[in-house]
Image: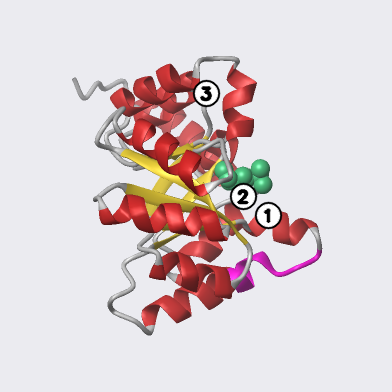
Amino acid sequence: MKFFVDTADIAEIRDLADTGLLDGVTTNPSLVAKTGRSFLDLVAEICDVVSGPVSAEVASTDFETMLAEGKKLAKIADNVAVKVPLTQAGLKTCKALSSEGTMVNVTLCFSPAQAILAAKAGASFVSPFVGRLDDIGQDGMGLIADIVEIYSNYDYFKTEVLVASIRNPIHIVDSARLGAHVVTAPPSVLKQLFNHPLTDKGLAQFVTDWQKTGQSIL
Ligand code: G3P
């Protein structure tokens, strides 16, 4: 299972990349706006830090402009995945870009029917938003189960299920249980995965007991 971080904060990206456990990055216009930085410079910097896919989202909603924006973003680095919305024009853009060998992440997916279309359009990734479905009282993880099951029926669907809008570690564990290929989560949620109070308690005891031996390994 691949772990992407859902942020445009370069310091957070560097910190997580340093662990060796980070496989990619997803950004969106809202996350970029928070940084106050030039989008194109930011994408280039992130692509230098992380060798895996870095999702950079188009800003327009019509086919011609999305295609032009996507082509420009794809030129920044080989690991750019152009992010397009799950609309008719977005999927047309996805088809055009993926046919040229560009990675595409189709975002704002909220139904199995939309996910089928993303796979048919040749998306590298489809991003179903679990948290935003949960927020309106719908079953976010149920959508992941449906998409994983449907995709597994067709060997020629190469699209990876990228679980997005993750709110907590349980979303990540449930995604793994269902066999989703990728999760993208905010830095705070990824960092929560490392922690357990019994790990802290046990480690404190081991350190104390080791000091009693008066030995040094090095
Ligand atoms: O980047 C797409 C998605 O992960 C956004 O999540 O928390 O804004 O619903 P959220």
Looking at the rendering, the stretch of residues picked out in magenta corresponds to 137-143
Q: Quadrant of residue 55?
A: top left
Taking the view exactly as shown, the residue that stands out farthest to the front is: 64
Residue 78: mark in rendering: none
Judge whether residue 117 is colored magenta: no
Q: Quadrant of residue 34?
A: top right
Q: Secondary structure at mark 3?
A: loop
Disc 2: which residue: 165
Disc 1: which residue: 131
Q: Residue at x 62, y 24 (%)?
A: 33
Ranked by sequence position, the earlier of labels 1 and 3 is 3
Please state which of residues 16 and 57 is positioned toward the viewer in this rendering.
57
Disc 3: which residue: 9
Tell me if mark 1 has few (under 14), some (14-19) or many (20+) residues whose alpha carbon lies within 10 angstroms of its own.
many
User: Would you say the beta carbon of the disc 1 residue lies within 8 angstroms of ligand 1?
Assistant: yes
Q: Secondary structure at mark 2?
A: loop
- Residue 43 visible in the snapshot: yes
Three-letter code, disc 1: Gly
